[in-house]
Structure formats: structure tokens, C-alpha cells
Image (spheres, rainbow, N blue to C red):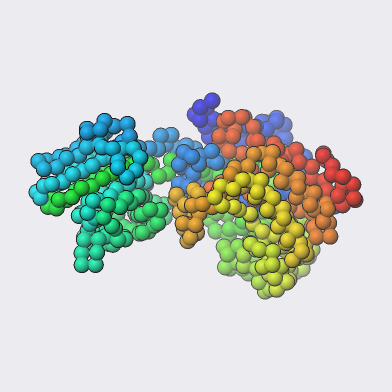
Amino acid sequence: MSLDGLRRRDVLKAAAVVAGGGAVVGLPGGTAAAAGPRVSATRTAVGAIRWDAWVGADWHTGSTVNRTLSPQEYQFRLPYYAQITVPNRLLVDQSFDSDTTGAGPSGWTVSAPTGTSVSVEAATDRTGKIVHLHDGSTTSPASMVHTFASQSHAVTVEWDWKETVAGTWARALLVDGSTAAVDIATTTDANGKHLVMRAPDGSWKVLQDVADNTWYSIKVIADPTPPQESPWVDVYVDGVRRISHAALLVSGATFDNLTLRTNETLTSDLYVDNVSVAVTESVNSNGATQAIMDQEIQYAAAAGIDYWAFVYYPQDPLSRARNFYLSSAHKNDVNWCALLDGNFTGAFDANLAALAPHFAESNYQKVLGDRPLLYFLSGATATNVASTRAKAAELGVADPYIVVMAWTAQSAADLKTSVGADAVSRYATGGTNGATYASLASAEAGLWTDYATAGGQVVPTVSTGWDNRPRYDYPVSWIADYASLKNNWVQQATPTEIANHLGAAVQWNGAHSANAAANAVLIYAWNEFDEGGWICPTLYELRDSGRPLRLDAIAGVSRNSAAKRKGRGPHTSD
């Protein structure tokens, strides 16, 4: 089936029948689940982290994560409710390898006045072919121009170039009609040879120094209509962002051609390769609707997910998914708890006043009988923990079971002691350089014991993957060190591998009951699609198989930890 065969409308049409017991894609007919998740002393409570930035293109955060998943190689991660708004995002995509040697580059309008030439030739210092703009004239430039359909939203432009003698005013212009919206050049001054960009006031901003006969890979992301922001342009050189959110040269710009050229008064030799222009944001993932939340509850309940740990955003629009959960008629089919970070703790008392009354509700996840479960990803202090316990007591609620997260076992243990928490955990476990998922799972399983040894009580984390490369290609505002993400990835897990890792965590809880009193685990994650951890059904998953394969595998994992807790062999079913 083509991607068009399973569009948003096909998935969302089921929303109208959820309340009446109808089927959702990849789920059996009938009601979503029995009322309320099962809870017992010997049944491990399986939770999953929710990171609800999927709020659509009309919001800065939603637009940002849309961009991370727009490249074709990452679209397999798109949530099932996503729209592919631009199926063919590449407007220009040319390596010149298939072009005729000695001819002008195909698809480009070439200008080669007397004394100049623009032609394809075999590269001598890299594989394949390149375009050579030779300029022996001191009165006219050599140029190549590629037009494309006019774009009123963000585009990503990439190219490689070098000059035999650097700094001779090679130019790259992203053009609106006949007016440059972005102008990048090379220049020479008393301080050396530079790559520069023109500002709206006519001045030139130095991006970095350049050297003779050296290839540079340039990437420009230009957005004339960003949500909640002024128009901007980012420029990267060899993967390093050299300018961020600089102003475009014109307001209200659209983009319709890319021009690469030499200078009209200087002689030079410019070489060009690997040119592309792409629609930056070619997908829209907006999960912040009541219909989608109702469906997600149904998917999670059918897979035996007991609770969601919502990264608790007090602010709109990131609070929308949680609010739609709380207003859902199906909210009792999957419990919830809060996972707090700086978004919450920045105004802790006010946000606690809004959160704490939920502790008493039947669908707020409890452990050890009736203790509300609460995670701190960051911002845990002795004052905040004490205030939480005091607020619960004031409301007549059992003492919250407070779990603090940290990236090492000892730092988690030290934090637990210093703030007076009950247990330790971690948000996720990653890996680098394309390590296998099996190696990630093995390392993480070892961490369960490390955290127990250092910190006593543990809620084991079950990571389903780790791949931050989308955030390297399109950096997000909340990660400053985006460059480190280039090699920050592991290979994709199979559904069976994820299920086996979850099963190992359940068994670990049974075998280490003295350190797992809460008998809970936490899956990373329900919907960290662009960071690499998810179990929520994806668009491609349902397109290709008609099933939520990861959830299907998870549904088959026994949650019964009684066998190990009672000294018997592991159970294979509930």
C-alpha cells in the first residue's frame, strides 16, 4: 500500500466510533479495555513517558519537531496521526554525476559571458562530477540559476563549494523574484579570507575563515513565516551553526530560485557539488485533540500499559495532551502520573496547587497501596519534596512515592538522600555510533542493579531506542549542544527486542523485590519520536502491517512478578 493509502483521515475516522465501541486501526473491535488497569502486589505496573510536543505547525515547538521528522529517512517514526503535507519535499536535488561532462548542469540556467564558462567535469579530489564556474573576466560573472516553485514557508538549501583561491567573492543567493532574501559570499580583507553573510543594513557578517582549494558544506535554513517569531535564517558550515536566527534581507519573502555565481570584477575558479533545496517542514504531527487522545488511550490500554508519566507542562499548548486525557471519557482505562522538570518547578508552589488534588483521583497511579507516584526529572530539592508531602497530607492523601531521576547511579542516590525521596530512576539510556539495541538493553539492565546498589529503591527504566540525529539535522532550541547529537544513536529495535527488554525488567523486579518495593517500571517512551524512543503506533507501521507492532509485542509480556518474588521460575503469561 502506498503512503497515500493510510492518511490521517483513515486513522482518525475511527474517533467517531470509539465511544460507541467501534474499531480503531490495528485494534480489535469492542471497547478499549476493562475499567481501570489491574493492580496487585505481584503484578508489575508498566508505565510509559509522554512528551507531548506534538501540537502542530501553528506553534513554535510543534513546528520544530515537525521539521526534525520531515527528512525522508526519519518519516518512519511519524506518529499514526501525522500528515505528510508535502510528499515530495525536494525541490532541487543534484549531485551532477549523471550530467554530461563538458555541458552545463541540467536544470540550471547558465550565464557564461566571454572569458567565462560553466560546465560539468570530473572531480579530481572527490568522487563523481562537479560544476566548474571559471571566470577569467573582470567585467562579467559566471552564474548558474535554478528556479523552483515559489515557497512561502521555510526551505533548507545545501551545497558544497570551493574556490581555487578563496575569498574572491563567490556568491550564493536565495532569491525572492529578483531580490535576494539570503546572500552568502566569500571575501578577503586585512584579517584574512572569510565566509560572510549580508545583513539587512548592508553590512557583512563574518561566519568563519576559509582557505584556498578547500571544500565547504553549507546549509541554510530560511523561514519567512515562523510561528510566534520574526522571519529568520540559520547558516551551518560543515555541520556547525555559524549564525542563528539572523534577519532575512526582505520581509514577507517567498523563495523561488537559487543563484550560484562568481564576481563580476575578479577572476576566479569556483566549484560546486551536491546542491539541494527542500521544503523544511513537510509533515504536520498534531496529536493535541480529544479524538486522538481517546484513540491513544485505547491503543495503550489494549497493550496493557498501566499508566502514562506525563512530562508536566503547565503552559499551553504543551499542556493540551494532558488536559485532553483528563477530559477523556476513557481516562480510567490508563492511569497517569506526573513527571516534573524545570517547566513545573520554575513556579513550584502554584503548579503543585494544581497538581496535588489529582493525587486522590482513582486514575492517578498509586503504588504500595495508595501512595501517588511522582517523578522528578529535574528540580528536585528538599523544599520541593517536603512541600509535596505536606500538600498531600493537607488534602488527606497518602504520602506520595517520590522518584528522582539522574544520569548516574551515584548521583541519583545522592539526590535521593539529599532531598528525601523514596526511589531512584533515570529518564532513558542511550548509545552512540550506531551501537546495537541489544547492547543498549544489556547496559540498561546492568544499570538497574547499579542504581539499586547505590540508591536502594528503584523504578527500572526500559528504553525502546535512542537516536537524536533528527535534532542534529534540525536543531531544537532546548538543546544547546546539538553538534554532539550527530553520532548519538543506536540501531532500531525490533518489537521482539523491546518486549524482551520489558520482560527482563519485570523479572528483575521480582528477583530484587527488596529494591523494587513499588513494583513499577517506566518505558522510555510513549512518544519521543524524534529522540528515538517510542511505542505509540506510527504512520508507516500501520501502513505496512496494519498493526501497532511494538504495542502488540508489549501486550504479550507477562506483568506477573510473583514467580521471582516467591522463588519460582518466571511465568510466561498472566
Residue nearest the observer in this picture, 303 or 349: 303
**Is residue 472 positioned above or below 371 on the image?**
above
Residue 110 screen position, x and y as percent: 19, 37
Q: Where is residue 352 in the image (x, y as percent from the top left)?
A: 65, 65
- Look at 23% across and 51% down and name the residue there: 164
**246 to the left or right of 560:** left
Quarter of the image that includes the N terminus: top right
Dividing the picture into quadrants, the one containing residue 453 is: bottom right
Residue 306 in view, yes or no: no
Q: Can residue 427 be seen in this view?
A: yes
Task: Look at 27% across and 52% down and name the residue there.
Answer: 213
> Quick check: 83 left or right of 448?
left
Where does the C terminus fall, quadrant-wise?
Answer: top right
* Relative to 297, 287 lies left or right: left
Q: In which quarter of the image is residue 559?
A: top right
Residue found at the very far top of the displayed protein: 1
Number of on-image labels: 0
Q: Where is residue 39 in the image (x, y as percent from the top left)?
A: 81, 49
Q: Position of residue 331 (x, y in %)?
A: 69, 46
- For image coordinates 80% across by 60% down, the residue present is 515
